[in-house]
Amino acid sequence: MLRTTTNLMKKSSILRLHYTTIVPKHHVPFDEKPFPFSRFQPCCPDVEIKQAENGFVPCKTHPFPSVLGKKIDMTDSMTRPAGIRHLVGCIGADAMEWTRAKVEAVPGIMQSLMTTENQWLKQNRSQVLNDKVVLTTVAERPATSTKPDVMLFPEFKIFKAVSSTNGIIDSDSPLYNALESIWQNPYNSLPPQKEWEDIKANTVIFVCTHARRDLRCGRLGPLIVDEFNRVIQEKRLQDKVEVWGTSHFGGHKFAGNVIIHQRGLGGHIYGNVRQCHVPTIVDRHILHGKVIEEIWRGEVTPPTI
């Protein structure tokens, strides 16, 4: 049984690297106003410290360990293929998944989603119309009960208290019905179900804080989360914006990595983010709906399906 589950997870990891070749074109509203920083540039450079070979310069206002800063890639292309949907398992900050480099190695919502998908694919491969681009992560957002919740973007929906049996999501559950539609074709609209609730926030930010996977995001991510929360409180946006740490979603060498989902704008990934950048990101992206091209890695989800 263990070997079968392991094989299923390995196959799922491979499947999730496949990308559809048919992506509806839409305009990404890049900001015409230049971003005041280059990649990973500090707001207050410590000129007394010599610049590292990779270009890293410590910041006097926002300290970050130089030993990690020297290992961040500030030159390679950060762009990645466009995505279609983002599934987020809400497991809380103390879940067992955070103790592993790969969250799917621990029985939980990530493992259940992956195993259930592969079980479905074994029987329904011929029904799949497109290769999928569905990112799946878990986040520190607490579940509303003893069972995990699952958020879905770009729809800004949440399904609460997801049930599973022996690590397989129950096939008669509304979540399974929605996932089955997505597995068939990621552009399918969600089947109408009263169990899907709207996420109240207008914007949801996920920052990679997965220290067991890589210390660059593991150390920098929580600092970025704190800075987002500080700026959001300062601008009185608490009722409109959520910020959560999340598991690995690729590109730790481009720390800090941030995903911002915003209604009408879709989901976008930024890389090489420092605490120094957060106030400008909130101003330009969240308040003005403009994507910052200088640190943009690509789309997680389009504005609509």
Image (cartoon, rainbow, N blue to C red):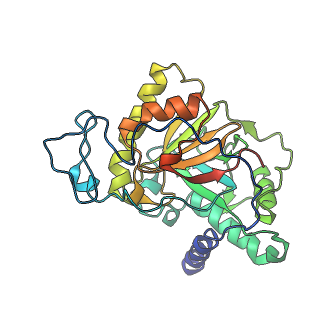
Provide residue 116's location: percent of width, then percent of height.
Answer: 69, 66
Q: Residue at x 39, y 45 (%)?
A: 38
Q: Residue at x 36, y 47 (%)?
A: 40
The residue positioned farthest toward the left in the image shown: 48
Provide residue 112's location: percent of width, then percent of height.
Answer: 63, 62
Q: Is 50 on the left or on the right of 42, as rendered?
A: left
Q: Can you see residue 86? A: yes
Q: Residue at x 45, y 20 (%)?
A: 234
Q: Is 44 on the left or on the right of 162, as rendered?
A: left
Closer to the camera in the image, 110 or 85: 85
Closer to the camera in the image, 221 or 10: 221
Closer to the camera in the image, 61 or 191: 61
Quadrant for the N terminus in the image: bottom right
Q: Can you see residue 228? A: no
In this rendering, is residue 199 above or below 190? above
Provide residue 85's location: percent of width, then percent of height.
Answer: 68, 53
In this rendering, is residue 239 above or below 145? above
Q: Is 213 on the left or on the right of 302, as rendered?
A: left
Closer to the camera in the image, 5 or 264: 264
Q: Residue at x 31, y 35 (%)?
A: 43
Quadrant in the picture for residue 131: bottom right
Count up the numbered dots.
0
Provide residue 253's location: percent of width, then percent of height.
Answer: 39, 60
